[in-house]
């Protein structure tokens, strides 16, 4: 009767898909995953906190030095055990907070790509997994913005953290820091665009107030990466972007977990 029709309306395709997905909850997130997206307004950087609700084991991605206290307070408020503070790459526009977090949270280890050449407790490469509780982040090498860029893919492929390789309707610049438009194009098309169409993509930055996109959206709508390789190279070669504001102190700092100005730093 009418009740049944109403129920169907409430449920809808999303509810059916969530039920079929098994571990996917109402928002499309896996059941048992705690997820927080945080923002640093000077460099427009997103920091991500993921945790297993049952074991309380957690990982933070791309923390910023200026907002470390906020991140640590949240970890403590939620009763989490932070296992890893990971970077998607060596950032040029802000100083990373990974080293500062590690100093304050016992047992936390810093993570960055081996290809970056930067200091960290754990160096990851293509195919590695960063594990927290029953969840894991698969490491996919996505160089081109820098040679040490990685994308972290949640093991059920419902979400991925793309760093600067892929932004919402954009991508990271390729005109310095080992940048290569050819390399970036192949990275995005082979490592990110091959994920499921409905996989949620969370970038390291956004300058327009958008927070998330999907593989399908970017394949169809990204004004740079939906084009041919040749068109992409032309676009990226003609951006004429300004020199990043914080690069001269950010790059040296980020090679050593953001701790180059700490007294007694041995890195």
Image: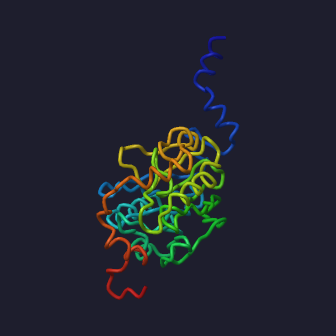
Q: Position of residue 243 (x, y in %)?
A: 31, 63
Quarter of the figure with residue 51: bottom right
- Is residue 168 positioned above or below 144 on the image? above
* Residue closest to the eye, 53 or 36: 36
Looking at the image, which residue is at 35% across and 61% down? 70
Q: Position of residue 67 (x, y in %)?
A: 34, 62
Looking at the image, which residue is at 63% across and 54% down? 190
Q: Position of residue 162 (x, y in %)?
A: 52, 55
Quarter of the figure with residue 262: bottom left
Looking at the image, which residue is at 30% across and 66% down? 246
Instruction: Judge from the rendering whether residue 29 lies leftward or rightward of residue 245; answer left or right.
Output: right
Quarter of the figure with residue 29: top right
Tell me the quarter of the image containing the C terminus.
bottom left
Tell me the quarter of the image containing the N terminus.
top right
Looking at the image, which residue is at 31% across and 59% down? 242
Q: Position of residue 261 (x, y in %)?
A: 32, 80
- Is residue 267 positioned above or below 168 on the image? below
């Amino acid at each position: 009767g009418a009740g049944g029709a109403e129920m169907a309306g409430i449920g809808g395709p999303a509810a059916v898909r969530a039920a079929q997905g098994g571990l996917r909850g109402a928002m499309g997130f896996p059941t048992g995953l705690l997820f927080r997206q945080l923002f640093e307004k000077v460099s427009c950087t997103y920091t991500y906190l993921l945790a297993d609700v049952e074991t309380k084991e957690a990982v933070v991605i791309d923390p910023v030095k200026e907002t470390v206290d906020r991140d640590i307070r949240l970890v403590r408020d939620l009763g989490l055990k932070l296992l890893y503070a990971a970077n998607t790459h060596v950032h040029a526009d802000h100083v990373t907070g990974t080293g500062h977090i590690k100093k304050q949270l016992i047992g936390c280890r810093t993570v960055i790509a081996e290809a970056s050449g930067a200091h960290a407790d754990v160096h990851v490469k293509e195919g590695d997994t960063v594990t927290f509780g029953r969840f894991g982040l698969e490491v996919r090498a996505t160089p081109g913005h820098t040679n040490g860029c990685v994308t972290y893919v949640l093991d059920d492929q419902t979400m991925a953290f793309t760093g600067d390789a892929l932004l919402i309707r954009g991508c990271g610049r390729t005109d310095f820091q080992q940048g290569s438009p050819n390399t970036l194009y192949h990275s995005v098309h082979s490592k990110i665009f091959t994920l499921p169409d409905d996989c949620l993509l969370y970038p390291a930055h956004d300058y327009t107030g958008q927070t998330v996109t999907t593989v399908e959206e970017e394949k169809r709508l990204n004004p740079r990466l939906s084009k041919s390789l040749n068109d992409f190279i032309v676009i990226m070669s003609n951006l004429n972007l300004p020199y990043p504001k914080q690069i001269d102190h950010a790059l040296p700092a980020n090679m050593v977990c953001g701790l180059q100005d700490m007294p007694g730093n041995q890195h």
